[in-house]
Image (cartoon, rainbow, N blue to C red):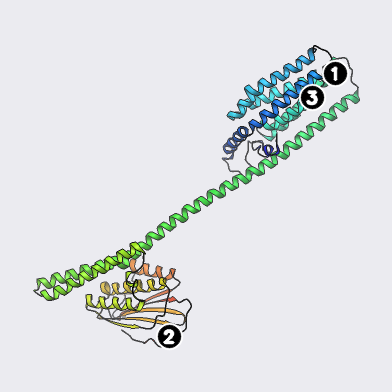
Amino acid sequence: MTTADLRHTGPVTSDGRPGGGAAAPASGGARSEAERTLFWRRALAGWDAAFYALLAISAISILTVADTFPPDGGTWAALGGLTLLLLAYVLVGRRGAQAGDVRLTRAYLVVLVVVVSLCSGVSTIGSILLFVGFSQVWFFAASMREGVVASVVLAVASCAAIATAAFAAGEDPTARDLVVLGAQMAVGLIFSLALGVWITRVAERSEERAWLLEQLESAQAQLAASNHASGVLAERERMAQEIHDTLAQGFTSVVMLAQTAQAQLDAGRAEQARDRLDQVERVARENLAEARALVAAFGPAALADATLAEALERLAERFQAETGVRVEVALGDAGAPDRDTEVVLLRAAQEALANVRKHAGARRVLLRLVRDDGVLALEVLDDGQGLAPGTAEGVGLRGMRERVTAGGGTLDVAGEPGRGTRVRLAMPLRDDDGPLGDPGTGTA
């Protein structure tokens, strides 16, 4: 039996339960039984070789030291005991270890104790089997208590068998001989118990570490699954916001322009209706470009070939052409903000103008871009009906706030009934080169 094998004797525990350290969960018994069976199956090949080798050495030793030839009855009894132990190992102990059947392994331990004790008594060399007996006790024992009891019983029974055989042979051993015999057997027992307890403690710590590692791996797997699910959900929300900020607003424009064109056709204003239809086509093409951009790079098509200021100017021109609302643009030098900041500002402008279209009833809008004190701020002011007290934020405004907050910026929406609405968001600039001067102070 190797040290590596001894360190894996997981079935032996200090509290008498099979396997599972102090930190093991309530279900550790079933888990440890499986680990015990796995250990038995893994170590059985090595135990086979060791057992057969020790058994052969014992048989040769018994025959070699026999006083008579042919062997006398004691020698034959010892050899018969070895044969019985071999059969018990193959038919009972080994089968129990392979199947994980504790009843079979315990039955084998009983045979082991009886045979080793008898062989120790009937042959002077039979005590060599104590090496086999003590080692196999700790291999087949299902708990520490079982290993201790079996070791003590084996030592006492072997000592009693040797003393009985001496008296039966008429040797009349003295008290000193009996004390020496008991001391020798006690030394062997103490060594066996110390080794078994140490092995058990090591095994328990090993099992506890294995259990903790299993729990850690399980927690890591759960965390990975949770992160994956969170990532999927976040990506869905981001895509939903992108679609709301681009395609949904574009389709709203298409519907409104188509309705206007229909009304103008009904009124006989074919030329004006044609202009509206041209706008429908232009908005539809822009929407198509946005859809392709979403599929290709999830970025605004308006920023693909233009600066932020140019994209905002185009947005303002299109909004004015579609709604008839006058849009004033005051754009300072935005410098070279990073791509994410540009996307946030452009989407915010689109959402703010969409809200003006749907809710404000405004006649005039100011779109202003200000770069100052390390931030790039966008303001959208209108002269519409304003905000009633307690007005809840809609999906678009909530998405705008989430987008701005995620980029490290701030969003402020203010308004009074009848006095218009002001939307201001500020995004921090990276590698700011300083103020750009007065960008203008236009008001709506």
The residue to which callout 2 is attached is 436
Relative placement, left or right, of 159 versus 146 is right
Residue 400 x/y as whole percent: 37, 70
Q: Amino acid at mark 2?
A: Leu
The residue to which callout 3 is attached is 127
Q: Residue at x 66, y 21 (%)?
A: 88
Q: Amino acid at mark 3?
A: Ser
Residue 192 x/y as whole percent: 76, 33
Secondary structure of the residue carrying tag 3 is helix
Secondary structure of the residue carrying tag 2 is loop
Viewer can see residue 394: no
Q: Residue at x 38, y 86 (%)?
A: 439
Secondary structure of the residue carrying tag 1 is helix
The residue to which callout 1 is attached is 166
Q: Are marks 1 and 2 in contact (CB under 8 Å)?
A: no
Give the spatial CA distance, label 3 vs label 2. 100 Å
Image quarter hosting the C terminus: bottom left
Give the spatial CA distance, label 1 vs label 3. 14 Å
Relative placement, left or right, of 121 versus 424 is right
Identify which residue, 258 or 23, lies in the foreground.
258
